[in-house]
Image (spheres, rainbow, N blue to C red):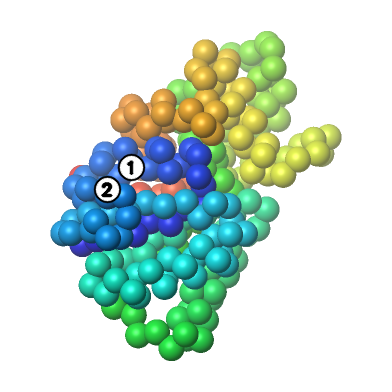
Amino acid sequence: MNYYFLLEDEKSSIKVLPNWLEYMGIKNIRVQDITYLTDNCYVMQSGQGVTQLITRVLFQTIDTIIQNPGKVDELIVILDSEEYDALSRKNQVNSIIEKYIKDKDYHIDFTYKVFVCNHCFETWLLGNRSLFPEERPSGDFQKYYDSYNVKDSDPEMMTVPQNVQETIASYHFHYLHEMCRYNKIRYSKKKPMIMAKEEYFNQLKIRIESTHHLRSFFEFYSYFNQT
């Protein structure tokens, strides 16, 4: 089984997901590009942002798979919903893929699957309950702590406070960044590797197995988990 992963993100999730796949029991080996695929391998590439991913890069990826028949068994697309409804975003991408294949009159020998982070990759990362303080903190994280409790409530349901002028995805990033900083953990999109550790992943696993929270992460986990 060979996978081709196409991710919207070019910084954080593309660095973290290879480790997560390993923790879920995926034995496939990551290779540089499609020409290196043999048996039980995968390619993981960035779509360079959602605008590029759902147009130029997605089309180029499908063309590349078609031009290398028998190399890829499944195309996996992972992107953020951001301000959109997650199901609407998924349906949008599925429709784009279907239309492109039809317009090009391609006869494909691979399947494809679209996963949407609701609202962004940081939303999934907020599922680690151990980071949320037991007592009301002081400092920069206090306003986030007071606005929403991501330990007891679903991070996917967290909206932006009325007095804050930013997107949901941006707010979730800042919430995570400040919660990590309160715990003396450095998180940035360029340096996300603490989230790639197995103990962090296990906290997310416990969350989705014990609650109905983070349903978009649950869908991703359920699809790939082989442990």
Residue that appears at 51% across and 55% down: 47
- Picture layout, residue 52 above or below residue 19: below
Q: Which residue is mark 1?
A: 18
Give me the residue at 34% from left, 59% from top: 4
Question: Is residue 86 positioned above or below 206 on the image?
Answer: below
> Badges 1 and 2: C-beta atoms under 8 Å apart?
yes
Question: Can you tell which of label 1 and label 2 is closer to the viewer?
Answer: 2
- Mark 1–mark 2 distance (CA, rounded to whole Å): 8 Å
Can residue 126 be seen at all in this image of the molecule?
A: no
- Name the residue nearer the viewer: 141 or 82: 82
168 sits to left or right of 77: right
Query: Along the horizontal axis of the image, is 71 left or right of 148?
Result: left
Q: Residue at x 68, y 37 (%)?
A: 171
Q: Which residue is mark 2?
A: 30
Outermost residue, left direction? Answer: 39
Q: Secondary structure at mark 2?
A: strand
Q: Position of residue 223 (x, y in %)?
A: 32, 57
Lower sequence index among marks 1 and 2? 1
Position above or below: 77 against 122: below
